[in-house]
Amino acid sequence: MATVNGYQGNTPVATSTGSKHPAPTAKTADAQSVLKRLQSELMALMMGGDSGISAFPEEDNIFCWKGTITGSKDTVFEGTEYKLSLSFSNDYPFKPPKVKFETACFHPNVDVFGNICLDILQDKWSSAYDVRTILLSIQSLLGEPNISSPLNTHAAQLWSNQEEYRKMVEKLYKPPNA
Amino acid sequence: MESLTSSPVCNLGILTSLDNDSVQEILQSYDGFCTAANSLLKSSGDLSLEHDFVSHVHTLCKHGLHILSRDYFLRLLEEAFEKNGASRFWRYFEDYSKIEEDLEKIDEDEIQRVLCNALEEICLEKENQEKCLLMLVHALQSYMDNLTDGKPDFDVGKVYLFSKYQLIVSSILMANLPRHFPEVLHFYFKGRLEELSTIMDGELNEENEHRDRDEMDLDEKNKYRTGEMDIDECYSQDKFSENSKLVRNIGKVVRDLRNLGFTSMTEDAYASAIFMLLKAKVHNLAGDDYRSSVLASIKGWIQVVPLQFLNALLAYLGDSISFDQHSSGIKSPLASQPSSCYSGTNTPSEGLIRWKLRLEYFAYETLQDLRIAKLFEIIVDYPESSPAIEDLKQCLEYTGQHSKLVESFISALRFRLLTAGASTNDILHQYVSTIKALRTIDPAGVFLEAVGEPIRDYLRGRKDTIKCIVTMLTDGSSGNPNGSGNSGDSLLEELNRDEENQENVAIDDDFNTDDKQAWIDAQRWEPDPVEADPLKGSRNRRKVDILGMIVGIIGSKDQLVNEYRVMLAEKLLNKSDYDIDSEIRTLELLKIHFGESSMQKCEIMLNDLIDSKRTNTNIKATISKTSQIDPVAAETGISLDNLDATIISSNFWPPIQDEALVIPESVDQLLSDYARRFHQIKTPRKLIWKKNLGTVKLELQFEDKAMQFTVAPVHAAIIMQFQDQTSWTSKNLAAATGIPVDVLNRRISFWISKGVLTESLGTDPSDHVFTLVDGMIEAGKNSGNTGNCEELLAGDEEAERSVASVEDQLRKEMTVYEKFILGMLTNFGSMALDRIHNTLKMFCVADPPYDKSLQQLQSFLSGLVSEEKLELRDGMYFLKK
């Protein structure tokens, strides 16, 4: 982390942060620290080399990331790949980022718009979490859905029949265009 | 035909009034005239015939036929000259018609003899004919006198006749001129000049001491005019009396040749002979020795030989004004002496001055061409060859042919230096010498710019350039491995000098400089050479800065500083004492040139060493205080006294190579003890050992002798395993020392080469057995001498560097980029080159941040494509699935 901090004054991103998330000018110092935090998270994520999860900021805005997770082995989602979008606010990491599925995902806790019902993204959020843990949590959510509070009741009902569920996943799965 | 119209008797009316008697008289006297004229020419102006001749002429004139008689006489002369003079004259030279083909066979003495004889004869002939012509003139004259009682146009007639005759003579000779005659003349003059030069040289040697004294004084040399006077005065007395005969002979030949109308041909011949002689002299004097200045002696020679000769010649021929004054009276040999004519008028004749300028320019040009052609060698020998450079500088000031130098030197560089065979060190050394040498010739650095460019371009293409430069800059003592001079010293020296210069400049820039100084500066001002690039500022601002030009090769000082940091780290880590005086000095010098901030990290590194020294002493102090009997020391026989630590702030050091190594238990304990004490003193800081770095001084004791070594920790760890067990298989040893087998095999060769261990094949072919050599008898022979600490890391070639080299760092950087690229492609699918480039620029803020060019990225990406990590389709990069 120290190395990243060493270059704090040097990021071209600083100029374009306001485009999608207009921040009050009083919070520039905060925006700077968010920026640093996100940069160091990106660095850690890139160097970490976790397989099956990845994320990267969009071209000109470090507050908007694109994420990619692949279905874990030995789950019904094996062999699938889902795109996510993550958008961070100026309060990050004190507020969780907004995370949505960009690819349609047939899952009990994901609605048709891609919204995700995951506790750590709502009331259980802590500033100790980061992009990497979010992505890992979503990856594990795929294999272990919370059937008790479903957004997609059809999926929740079908979950008990893994074979049928697998067929449904395959039927609805549209691989993200490369 | 002015005389025709002016003649009172010549009009057409006279033809009608002619009667038979007159016709008869005319015919008779014409016959008589013809006979008389013929016999007159045959007898070469016999005076007895004069009376007869004159009366016939008178008769003809009386009838107004003087034109007829004159023309007839001239035609007779022409025929006679052609027959007796020209054809005979040319016959002398028939033998030399092949002169150009076999130059070896030329006998210059013979040419001289033949030429002299021929000239003598033809001149005699001409003289006789002139005598006859004069007779005709007299005859015509006396008739005219009778007619007019005065002498109105005698002169006109005489001058006219003689110039006509002269024209006839030269046109006859020219018409039959054999092609080789100029050659003959050339050889004649060459022979004569050489003879003269030999005489002069002989006398030069006699007077050598005197001359040497003259040449000692540089000022004297520059004002060679005065020097020449001296020389002339002391020699000319005896020298010239000997030479005057020779010169007079030549003078006579020249005068005869002029007399025959060969003026310009003669001048060409002796000019070319002089120039050839001068050229030979310059080549002879200049030769291949660049350690002495030859310009002065060439100038001296010009004064003594060709100019003396010309002076004498011109004086003899009466061309020089000064000569006229003296020679009008007596024709003594002394009269043609230059010294007397100098002292008389105190100015050499104009013709002589022109000759002198011509000769000097020619000498400058010849020497310059000679030096330029050998400039490469001269610069290789720099600074020993600086006299040759000085000569060249003076020549170029005269001739102004700097561009010739640039062109020729660049092509020499391309052929001889900028080739794969030349080592980078040599190229750099030559580059520095070139800068220094050309700075003498051209202080403004305009031509240096042009010459340096190809070298810089070439060096940029070499990988080890930066490394060599840094070594050159900082490593004064290590010298040049190829032995071609100690380049390191010279550069450091250069840095020092620049440092001093800067101080001087600072004073110069002060506004307090008085008017006098300003006036001196203004007087010294010279315009920039025409070739100067106006964009590069005027000469005052453009100081030739060697260091600047070297940094210019690399492009940026940052790269150089970075490389220096790596080398400094290497050097510091291998130090066993804390003596860093020379490093501090180097750093201070570098700071002056590159600024404090860029050298900050290096400064911290040096401070680390200073701090280490203090901390080390403190820790040692705690030992002696706390316990006299150290438990560890008692066990192993090694006490903390033997341990010196270099404590580094690793953030500011270049990345340090980590290498697995299990060091022997006893030493390990020592290290942790040291670390514990450090922690006590410096709480909350903790010491983390880099066990693979540093040096170990150890002594190996055998039954009959002891050997001392200074080695890397790896080597020490290996050999220490043999303390308890004299034979190890490589696998076991690798396990014991914690280093991979292949590394072990490489490292252990150090001990094998020292004769301490032997290697043999074990049962398992992949497993070697290393055994301690008993008694070290052969080992003593192998290692030659014992206790040589010096050969320590030298024997450990391609020495495992303790610090990651710049290339390694670069590779590491690139892996970071690779991960970023793979990461972004995972999320965005496909990306074009410039988008990857921009994204990296924006988000890759690793240390150091992404700073590659688009081209570098492209080549890196194509590397990834060939590694089958990426795919490239339609200008878009994809992940290879």
Image (cartoon, rainbow, N blue to C red):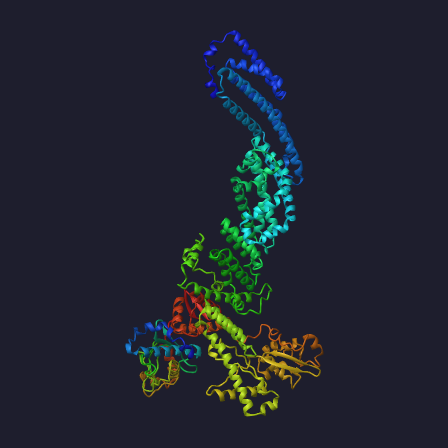
**Can you see residue B570?**
no
Q: In this view of the protein, which residue sits in the foreground, A45 or B525?
A: B525
Q: Position of residue B361 (x, y in %)?
A: 53, 46
Q: In this view of the protein, which residue sits in the foreground, A34 or A81?
A: A34
Q: Is residue B223 above or below residue B547?
A: above
Q: Is residue B370 above or below residue B247?
A: below
**Can you see residue B753?**
yes
Q: Position of residue B310 (x, y in %)?
A: 57, 40
Quadrant occupied by the C terminus of chain B: bottom left
Residue found at the very far top of the displayed protein = B20
Q: In this view of the protein, which residue sits in the foreground, B647 or B245?
A: B245
Q: Is residue B494 above or below residue A121?
A: above
Q: Is residue B411 above or below residue A158?
A: above
Numbered marks: total: 0
Q: In this view of the protein, which residue sits in the foreground, B745 or B161?
A: B161
Q: Position of residue B798 (x, y in %)?
A: 58, 72
From the viewer's perspective, tell me whether residue A149 is left or right of residue B880. Answer: left
